[in-house]
């Protein structure tokens, strides 16, 4: 059993006991088959990712971006680019830095300040999210320096062609930590540790033969899409709090149930439509969430470093 298998089992365990969120099992098969055939590959958006140049630079971008790929609980208050989401704003800031200056060395990341991060991303240096980003990239820089000789590509190489092995390694790094507890059960979502494997692979910075074993990259958008589409249902009290813009507490039962039920719903969809992996469903649903139908309705938010 890998750590990813533990995540899958734990999410199924939570979904079976959830009191605030329910999977509409009767809708799974029809919904899975209603989703379109993938129009393009599963790679990251070429306008946001770094997909050119040396493999070391591509690996550096994937690892650095995913080290700061969180903050959705703060999105309503950060400075966004015109027409852009919070994630897109941060990804574009990082991409522009790579285009103008190249990647940071691991040693530079290990000394990164909140002010430097804020300047790169176009944000206020005093905002608490910038301090969290700085702490995350410092941990990344230290790990890459001390454990991989300063090479970002070596992080991928150390996994020996296995995304599951890389998730196991990254799970022990503070910059990719994402484990919740639910009624005494550990739930290792590891959203960003799994996502970075996919990004490294699709950027050509690594080659993993077991990407089909990854779970949904559990955030707050895909459960929202599934709720709007009637695949997940929330109890009236939880739904009212979300609609009112109330922040959920990260690690609370409701928040863990939302993420776990999203993961389990997608696992059930892969059984209904086995030609698609959880990663493929993630790709389809994340892009579906860009439509106005989903953007105009509040999704749950929690301030955490998980997503």
Image (tube, rainbow, N blue to C red):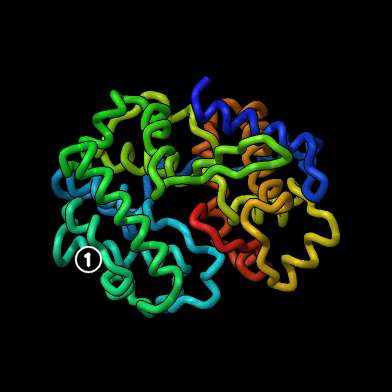
> Residue 64, how many percent across, how many down?
30, 53
Compared across the picture, whether 51 is left or right of 14 comes to: left
For the point 35% across and 43% down, which residue is it? 199
For the point 77% across and 34% down, which residue is it? 16
State whether residue 37 appears in this view.
no
* Above or below, 22 relative to 125: above
Compared across the picture, whether 240 is left or right of 90 comes to: right
> Residue 224, how many percent across, how many down?
66, 56
> Residue 277, how many percent across, how many down?
52, 32
Numbered circles on residues, count? 1
**Element assignment for label 1:** helix
For the point 24% across and 39% down, which residue is it? 205
* Above or below, 161 relative to 218: above
Place residue 249 in its image quadrant. Answer: bottom right
Residue bearing the label numbered 1: 97
> Residue 266, how many percent across, how many down?
63, 37
* Depth order, front residue of 206/70: 70
Place residue 208 in its image quadrant. Answer: top left
Compared across the picture, whether 13 is left or right of 236 comes to: left
State whether residue 122 appears in this view.
yes
Question: Residue furthest toward the top?
Answer: 1
Compared across the picture, whether 10 is left or right of 68 comes to: right
Disc 1 crowd rating (10 Å Cα; few below 14, some 14-19, many 20+) is some
Place residue 149 in its image quadrant. Answer: top left
For the point 51% across and 45% down, which residue is it? 178
């Amino acid at each position: 059993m890998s750590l990813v298998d533990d995540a899958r089992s734990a999410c199924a365990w939570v979904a079976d006991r959830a009191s605030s969120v329910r999977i509409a099992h009767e809708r799974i098969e029809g919904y899975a088959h209603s989703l379109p055939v993938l129009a393009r590959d599963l790679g990251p958006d070429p306008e946001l990712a770094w997909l050119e140049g040396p493999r070391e630079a591509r690996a550096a971008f994937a690892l650095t971006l995913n080290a700061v790929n969180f903050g959705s609980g703060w999105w309503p208050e950060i400075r966004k680019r015109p027409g852009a989401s919070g994630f897109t704003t941060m990804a574009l800031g990082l991409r522009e830095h790579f285009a103008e200056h190249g990647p940071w060395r691991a040693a530079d990341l290990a000394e990164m300040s909140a002010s430097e991060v804020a300047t790169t991303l176009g944000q206020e240096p005093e905002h608490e999210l910038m301090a969290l980003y700085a702490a995350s990239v410092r941990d990344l820089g230290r790990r890459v320096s001390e454990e991989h000789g300063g090479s970002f590509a070596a992080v991928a190489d150390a996994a020996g062609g296995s995304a599951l092995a890389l998730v196991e390694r990254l799970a022990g790094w503070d910059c990719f930590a994402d484990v919740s507890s639910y009624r005494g059960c550990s739930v290792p979502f590891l959203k960003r540790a799994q996502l970075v494997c996919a990004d490294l692979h699709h950027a050509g910075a690594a080659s993993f033969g077991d990407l089909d074993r990854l779970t949904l990259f559990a955030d707050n958008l895909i459960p929202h899409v599934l709720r709007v589409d009637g695949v997940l249902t929330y109890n009236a009290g939880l739904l009212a709090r979300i609609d009112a813009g109330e922040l959920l507490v990260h690690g609370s039962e409701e928040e863990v149930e939302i993420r776990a039920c999203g993961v389990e719903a997608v696992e059930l969809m892969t059984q209904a439509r086995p030609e698609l992996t959880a990663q493929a469903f993630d790709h389809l649903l994340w892009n579906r969430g860009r439509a106005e139908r989903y953007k105009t309705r509040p999704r749950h938010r929690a301030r955490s470093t998980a997503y």
